[in-house]
Image (cartoon, rainbow, N blue to C red):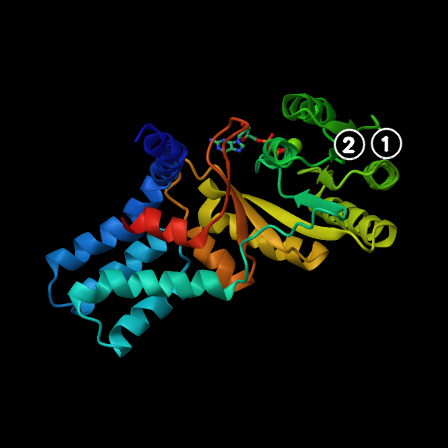
Amino acid sequence: MFNFFKKNEPVQNKEAENKTAFQTFKDAVSKTSDALVSNILNIVSNNEKLDEFALDDIETQLIKADLGVDLAVSIVEKIKENDIKSNNIKEFLKSEFENILNSAGSNVLNFLPDKLNIYFVAGVNGAGKTTLIGKLARKFKIEGNKVLLAAGDTFRAAAEEQLDIWSKRADVDIVREDKADSASVVYRAIEKAQNEGYNVLIIDTAGRLQNKFNLIEELKKIKNVIVKKAPDAVLESILVLDANLGQNGLSQAKVFKEAIELTACALTKLDGSSKGGVIFSIAKEYSIPVKLVGIGEKIEDLKDFNKDEFIKAIFN
Ligand SMILES: Nc1nc2c(ncn2[C@@H]2O[C@H](COP(=O)(O)OP(=O)(O)OP(=O)(O)O)[C@@H](O)[C@H]2O)c(=O)[nH]1
Ligand SMILES: [Mg+2]
């Protein structure tokens, strides 16, 4: 009997752990959930017959929840076309949101343990790039990988120092060359990774240069170095977006996508943001899957984005 209990203990602990992790995530997205789901359901419960006014209110609320005008309009059109009744709205929205997220492709970060995996991290200043890199480095390190960081933000005075601090926290190695050209830092980092058997290289980049043109040109240059120097590596080009910017952050996605062919998005500062609905716009308009979410400033506050979990967290 004792053994029976003993055997089950780890499973119960695991379940409890998962529950807390889910609750933490649910708490982090609670404002997004209010904006996207609760407020809509309130409109519906006050308007059992979904007339034009109620549908207008739903559309306005979807736009307010940072879904973007086009997406909000198309969802309300579908409600009309399919004559969705008020008691079916919740299920309808849920399946719409699921379809949108599925349309952008897999949310799993590309990674092959026996290859060099390069994570090229870009985004405007303050988006949370360096913090994300620290968190990601720790995650890979804990999972048993050999991790190297490249201090590619050579523009801002304190940037390399900041990445250095994160490398120490995550207990991983770093390549930094003060005042060097960022593409040459990246070149050296790839060389080191290849020669010394690292399987994860994460590249930090500047969020601001003299102007946007220079920033984009620098990113293109780094991308060229990666493609030429490590053609066989697994490459994820990740755009870091601050969730608090909502729709305002999306114009950035276009510019970065054109410059460096983004393969993933990391949405930071989702904790406390009511604008997480922007995830659907990123998927629908730019076909970029969100693969990582930041839910706090601490090193452990990073999550792999899981569609089902996100839907469950905002609907329950
Ligand atoms: N609440 C919260 N804060 C975050 C999160 N990620 C980053 N931050 C904070 O956002 C601020 C900017 O983060 P950085 O990582 O320095 O941003 P960056 O994109 O590297 O900025 P630049 O190097 O200036 O381009 C810091 O104060 C971080 O602590 C998050 O997921 N949640
Ligand atoms: Mg930075």
User: In the visual, does 271 lie left or right of 260?
Assistant: left
- Residue at image location 69% in from the left, 27% down from the top: 163
**Helix, strand or loop status at disc 2:** loop
User: In the visual, does 186 lie left or right of 109?
Assistant: right
Work out how far the residue at label 2 is from the one at label 1, CA to CA, in angstroms.
Answer: 7 Å
Which residue is outermost to the bottom? 81
Q: Is residue 97 above or below residue 186?
A: below
- Residue at image location 73% in from the left, 26% down from the top: 160
Q: Are marks 2 and 1 in contact (CB under 8 Å)?
A: yes
Q: Which residue is mark 2?
A: 154
Q: Nearer the viewer, residue 146 or 13?
A: 13
**Helix, strand or loop status at disc 1:** loop
Q: Which mark is residue 308?
A: none
- The amino acid on which the numbered mark 2 sits, given as a three-letter code, is Thr
Q: Is residue 55 above or below residue 194?
A: below
Q: Position of residue 307 (x, y in %)?
A: 44, 54
Q: Nearer the viewer, residue 109 or 37?
A: 109
Q: Quadrant of ligand 1?
A: top right
User: In the visual, does 199 lie left or right of 105?
Assistant: right
Q: Nearer the viewer, residue 250 or 210?
A: 250
Task: Examine the rendering and report whether any part of residue 72 can be seen.
Answer: no
Within-10-Å neighbours for mark 1: few <14, some 14–19, many 20+: few
Q: Position of residue 257 (x, y in %)?
A: 65, 57
- Residue at image location 70% in from the left, 45% down from the top: 120
- The amino acid on which the numbered mark 1 sits, given as a three-letter code, is Ala
Sequence-first disc among 2 and 1: 2
Task: Examine the rendering and report whether any part of residue 16 can be seen.
Answer: yes
Q: Which residue is mark 1?
A: 180
Q: Position of residue 234 (x, y in %)?
A: 73, 52
Q: Nearer the viewer, residue 170 or 224?
A: 170
Q: Position of residue 7 (x, y in %)?
A: 39, 34
Q: Quadrant of the N terminus?
A: top left
